[in-house]
Amino acid sequence: MASLTSPWLRLLVLLVAMTTFLQHALAAAGGSGNPTAGFQKVQLPDGDFQVQSPYNVPENQRFRYRDGVRTFWVHRNDKPFNTATHTNPRSEVRLRGYGYVPSGTSGVSVMQIHNEEGAAHSTVLMLHVYDGVLRFYSGAAIEPDIYDRWFRLNVMHDVGAGAAVEPNIYDRWFRLNVMHDVGASTVAVLSVELGPDDVPPFVAAPAWYPAFTESALSQFDGLDQADHVLVNSFRDLEPMEQEADYMQSKWRAKTVGPTLPSFYLDDDRLLSNKAYGFNLVSSTSSCMAWLDKQAPCSVLLASYGTVANLETTQLEELGHGLCNSGQPFLWVLRSNEADKLPQELHDKCNMKGLIVSFCPQLEVLVHRATGCFLTHCGWNSTTEAIATGVPMITIPQWADQPTTAKYVESVWGIGLRARRDEKGLVRREEVERCIKEVMGGEEYKRNSSKWMQKAKEAMQEGGSSDKNIADFAAKYL
């Protein structure tokens, strides 16, 4: 008998789609991970593409076109394109191209890569089209409704600025590689449209993350031969019946979650089951005693998991946002993370809230004082928040977290995803906005209460997950 349980399987339908596409792409490319494998290219004439290189460098030394990707090398000490331009040493790469995107195109990627090994100002800029809207990597829309018409895209990279910019004073263009997904009809339909920011980076650009792509796909080796696939979810959480039905017919998958201690699921059969079976700390009295002094539903729990490492700047923005929100907060920071905070900010946070290195997360979530959970959106933390009825603010990082965050916000309606700025940071103003909206939003509370009840019903006697567990056990007992 083979079995598989994993937080990665929180949306088996999505992962079937990922796996189907990536395995097809890897096979077609001979294992190279070519992201264009399995697609039909719409050719654009080379006459619609131009590049400006520094005046003292031949174009062929800085420009390469291979496998559908145009690559440019720019250096900090490059001369301007025009000798009459009075600027600091820099390189201006100006690209111009007109593209036509026909109806039915499932995705378009526009990539501009500026890379010098070891350069301080190297930049990778990715632009995507999803649903016929052209967007910058930051998510800002550039051009809506591009289907069945020609349009021009202007892009420039200024090495001296150290960033990709989009002012309107230059005539900058870009050429598109337009790809049609010829196998879309074989992929299961999801209940929500996923954009590039809603899937792991190795799915959006598998060739850029070959090791991670291979590692992710290896988790699904042998699923077709498995006797059972057990999923830490519950049937009602899959928002469309065809999702649950599809994963059951595809892999004989059965939902058996949420796999929390029975005490938190109001399961009268095993009320003594209050822990996962181990404790990482010997005492949590100070943490819980602090919560006991707070008003009902007033405290925000902020915890980013046990693995993620945030940059110092992001930690500072998060700390200021928590302090500025006006809500008491319990911030779980590992000691190596807390050391990144300036002492003044650390002291300020401990005045307005409480910083701890660990907390009993389930106990905190069910505490009467807890009203919101700021989380990285790992699946274990997400299921705990759902089962305890606590609305969420999500700041996902990698793996399945962006997809889970999309469902939290757009499908289940139990929280908000904090938006990043053009530098990839969630600023203090955004943190404050999300806290005020979620903790003051009655709809988030109602939806969270609804899903909590459904989660408990699934695991209680006669519930969908309870039946699946009983059926599985009956085969071997």
Image (cartoon, grey):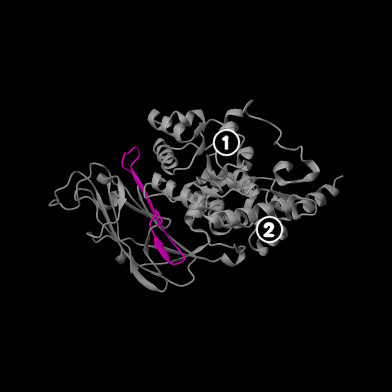
Q: Is residue 28 visible to the viewer in this orientation of the structure? A: no
Identify the mark nearer the N-term, 1 or 2.
2
Quadrant in the picture for residue 271: top right
> Image check: 27 left or right of 324?
right
Residue farthest along the bottom direction in this orientation: 148
Q: Secondary structure at mark 1?
A: helix
- The mark lying in front, picked from 1 and 2, is 1
Query: At 46% across and 50% down in the image, what residue appears?
Result: 436
Image location of residue 33, percent across then percent down: 52, 51
Which stretch appears magenta? 115-139
Which residue lies under the disc numbered 1? Answer: 291
Quadrant in the picture for residue 411: bottom right
Query: At 31% across and 39% down in the image, what residue appears?
Result: 120
Residue farthest along the right direction in this orientation: 477
Q: Is residue 249 visible to the viewer in this orientation of the structure? A: yes
What is the spatial separation of the Cα atoms under label 1 and label 2, in whole angstroms?
32 Å
Which residue lies under the disc numbered 2? Answer: 236
Q: Secondary structure at mark 2?
A: helix
